[in-house]
Amino acid sequence: MLAGTACGPRALSDSDLLKYAASPYDKRSMEGKHIVLGVHGGTKVVVDFPCSDLCPQYTTRIIHYDLEPGPECSARGGVEQRIDVPVGIGRFPVPFCLPKVLAENQTLYKL
C-alpha cells in the first residue's frame, strides 16, 4: 500500500497510480472508507470505497482527484468521467475527476 511521509502525502507518478489501480484490494476491510492516496502532479488523489445492498461483494474502488468535475478538473489535468456507484439495489453514474492516466487505461483499473 502506498503511504505518505512525515512531511505529507506521498508524491504519486503515473506508474504508481496504474500499479495501485491494477492491484487487488480487500472489499470487506475497505468497504465505506475514504483515504488519501497521495499527490499526483500537485493534486490530491483520494480513494472512495462505496457499497450498497450486497456488501462487501459490491464494494467499488474509485480513485480520483479531490476536485469537483468541471473546469477546475480540466485545468489541473484531470478528466471528467462518470463511474457507476452502488446505490440501493442498483448503480447510478456519478461524475468524478480522474487522473488522465487512469481515464486512458481503464482496462487495467480494478473497480
Image (spheres, rainbow, N blue to C red):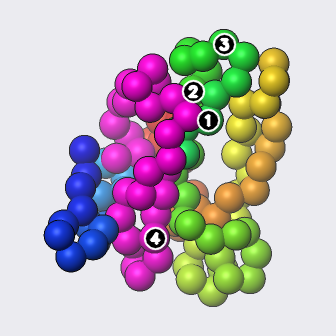
Name the amino acid, label 2: Thr
Q: Look at the numbered discs 4 and 1 and tell me whether their residues touch, using CB distance below 8 Å.
A: no
Q: What residue is disc 4 on?
A: 44
Asked if 49 appears above or below 17 in the picture, the reply is above
Which tag, 3 or 4, sits closer to the chain's start? 4
Distance of mark 1 from mark 2, alpha carbons? 6 Å
Residue 83, quarter of the rendered image: top right
Q: Name the residue beneath numbered marker 1.
A: 50
> What mark, if any, has residue 54 been given in the picture?
3
Q: Secondary structure at mark 1?
A: loop
Q: Is residue 66 above or below residue 21?
A: below
Distance of label 3 from label 2 (alpha carbons): 8 Å
Residue extending farthest left? 6
Q: Nearer the viewer, residue 1 or 7?
A: 7
Of marks 1 and 2, which one's residue comes earlier in the chain? 1
- Disc assigned to residue 59: 2
- Mark 3 and mark 2 lie on one chain; the one further toward the N terminus is 3
Q: Amino acid at mark 4?
A: Lys
